[in-house]
């Protein structure tokens, strides 16, 4: 599990192409190396990946074809950077909201509105069906960052970035047209799906 509080930024050091999957080797920030072991979970732009090799600060992760297809990790090149979060520890403070690291889809940045001490970013989801889980003032994870939804219009929503988020993550460097990873808040999904099933059953009973 993760919290959506990005702990650092790591550069993609090298890529090894293999049959039906790819290995990414990142240069992990020194402050995130403590107690890192094989099999540990680390989120890259919100995608939960497993440590497969440790060589000093060069850490390897295997990405399956489905991960490369669904997320923006498949478009990365050597030298690109990713938001990094180590898996949360039992008893740790949850500063964002609980995340699984299972990305639903990528979405396109459609607009950037900069003002003093704030950056508003509008994001367009590719599937209108997912918008039922995107609620004003609700939670959503964008590239692994826990954010509050500011406003919803059609199949778009906006998030507002404070200076701390801009400084600690790669989100402030995104431009219009860039793709970001989206993870829907699981609690919101559970509530919406439960209400839908209840109303469907109630409607069926009346027929």
Image (tube, helix red, strand yellow):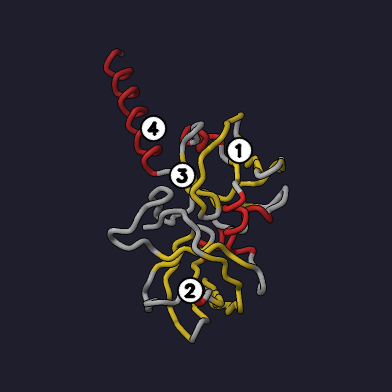
Q: Quadrant of the N terminus?
A: bottom left
Near-viewer residue (142 or 164): 164
Residue extending farthest top: 206
**Relative to 146, is 157 on the left or the right?**
right
Nearer to us: label 1 or label 3: 1
Nearer to us: label 1 or label 2: 2
Q: Residue at x 65, y 40 (%)?
A: 122
Residue at mark 3: 184
Residue at mark 4: 192
Secondary structure, mark 2, is helix
Residue 100, quarter of the rendered image: bottom left
Residue 31's label in the rendered image is 2
Mark 3 to mark 4: distance in Å?
Answer: 12 Å
Q: Indicate which disc, 1 or 2, sits on the residue closer to the N terminus.
A: 2
Q: Quadrant of the C terminus?
A: top left
Tag 2: Cα neighbours inside 10 Å, few (<14), some, or many (≥20)? Answer: few
Q: Indicate which disc, 4 or 1, sits on the residue closer to the N terminus.
A: 1
Q: Indicate which disc, 4 or 2, sits on the residue closer to the N terminus.
A: 2
Mark 1 to mark 2: distance in Å?
Answer: 32 Å
Q: Indicate which disc, 1 or 3, sits on the residue closer to the N terminus.
A: 1
Near-viewer residue (203 or 198): 198
Secondary structure, mark 4, is helix
Residue 158's label in the rendered image is 1
Near-viewer residue (30 or 23): 30
Tag 4: Cα neighbours inside 10 Å, few (<14), some, or many (≥20)? Answer: some
**Relative to 98, is 164 on the left or the right?**
right
Secondary structure, mark 1, is strand
Mark 4 to mark 2: distance in Å?
Answer: 39 Å
């Amino acid at each position: 599990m993760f919290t959506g509080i990005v702990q650092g930024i790591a550069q993609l050091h090298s890529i090894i192409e293999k049959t039906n999957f790819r290995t990414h080797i990142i240069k992990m920030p020194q402050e995130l190396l403590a107690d890192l072991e094989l099999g540990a979970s680390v989120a890259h732009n919100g995608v939960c990946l497993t440590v497969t090799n440790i060589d000093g600060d060069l850490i390897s992760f295997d990405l399956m074809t489905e991960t490369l297809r669904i997320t923006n990790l498949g478009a990365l090149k050597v030298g690109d950077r990713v938001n990094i979060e180590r898996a949360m520890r039992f008893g740790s403070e949850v500063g964002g909201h609980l995340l699984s690291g299972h990305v639903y889809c990528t979405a396109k940045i459609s607009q950037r509105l900069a003002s003093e001490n704030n950056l508003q970013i509008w994001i367009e989801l590719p599937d209108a069906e997912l918008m039922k889980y995107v609620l004003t003032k609700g939670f959503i994870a964008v590239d692994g960052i826990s954010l509050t939804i500011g406003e919803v219009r059609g199949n778009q929503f906006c998030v507002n970035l404070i200076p701390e988020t801009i400084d600690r993550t790669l989100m402030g460097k995104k431009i219009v047209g860039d793709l970001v990873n989206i993870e829907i808040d699981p609690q919101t999904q559970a509530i919406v799906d439960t209400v839908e099933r209840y109303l469907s059953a109630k409607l069926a009973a009346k027929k």
